[in-house]
Structures are given as C-alpha cells and as structure tokens.
Image (cartoon, helix red, strand yellow):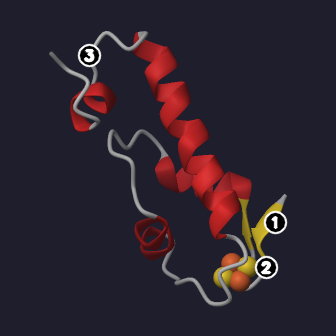
C-alpha cells in the first residue's frame, strides 16, 4: 500500500528501510534513508505508525528483557 504519494513509497518500502535497526528513527531519518524528503507531510502519521509497529515487534522478539539492541536504545536495559 502506498503510504507516501509524493514520493511513491509503500509501507513495505518503509519496513525494509527500518530493517533490523535497533533505534527508533525519526520520520526525517526514514525519508533520508530512502533518499527523499517529506513534501506535503500527509504521510507522517502513517510512517510514525509503521515505526511504532516496528519497535513494538522488536520488543516482542526479546520479550522486553532489556537484553536486545532495541531495549538498550530505548533505555529499557537495567
Ligand atoms: S504524502 Fe508523503 S510527503 Fe506528501
């Protein structure tokens, strides 16, 4: 599904860009990694939602034990 019509980016494109990144990138960073930038901004909420889903799924992978890169970058590690 296209989430950014200005740059013709799909939700899959965004997820692939997020890959296994342990951090929670900003929307601007997501655009930069895809070689473009926000234009009208209508897609920002959708991209934030995809980033949030990605972070949640990464936490699910380790169970929030604080031992994975995602937990460490979120400051959840003890
Ligand atoms: S829809 Fe993404 S910048 Fe316009």
Vertical position of residue 64 compared to residue 15: above or below: above
Q: Is mark 2 within 8 Å of ligand 1?
A: yes
Image location of residue 57, percent across then percent down: 55, 27
Query: Residue 2 got which mark?
Result: 1
Q: Is mark 1 within 8 Å of ligand 1?
A: no
Secondary structure of the residue carrying tag 3 is loop
Farthest residue, direction bottom: 39
Q: Which of marks 3 and 1 is nearer the N terminus?
A: 1
Farthest residue, direction right: 1
Image location of residue 42, percent across then percent down: 72, 77
Vertical position of residue 67 compared to residue 72: above or below: above
Which residue lies under the disc numbered 2?
A: 5
Instruction: Using the image as rendered, state which of residue 24 and residue 32 is in the foreground.
Output: 24
Circles 2 and 1: CB atoms closer than 8 Å: yes
Image location of residue 9, percent across then percent down: 70, 70
Instruction: Using the image as rendered, state which of residue 16 and residue 50 is in the foreground.
Output: 50
Which residue lies under the disc numbered 3?
A: 66
Residues packed near mark 1 inside 10 Å, few (<14), some (14 to 19) or many (20 plus): few
Residues packed near mark 2 inside 10 Å, few (<14), some (14 to 19) or many (20 plus): few
Secondary structure of the residue carrying tag 1 is strand
Query: Residue 67 got which mark?
Result: none
Q: Can residue 55 be seen in this view?
A: yes
Q: In which quarter of the image is residue 54?
A: top right
Q: Is residue 7 visible?
A: no
Q: Is mark 3 within 8 Å of ligand 1?
A: no
CA distance separating discs 3 and 1? 34 Å
User: Residue visible at 39% across and 56% down?
Assistant: 25
User: Residue visible at 62% across and 90% down?
Assistant: 39
Secondary structure of the residue carrying tag 2 is loop
Split into quadrants, the picture shows ligand 1 in the one at bottom right
């Amino acid at each position: 599904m296209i989430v950014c019509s200005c740059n013709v980016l799909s939700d899959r494109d965004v997820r692939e860009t997020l890959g296994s990144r342990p951090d929670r990138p900003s929307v601007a960073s997501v655009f930069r990694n895809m070689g473009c930038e926000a234009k009208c901004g209508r897609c920002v909420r959708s991209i934030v939602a995809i980033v949030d889903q990605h972070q949640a799924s990464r936490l699910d992978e380790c169970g929030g034990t604080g031992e994975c890169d995602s937990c460490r970058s979120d400051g959840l590690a003890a």
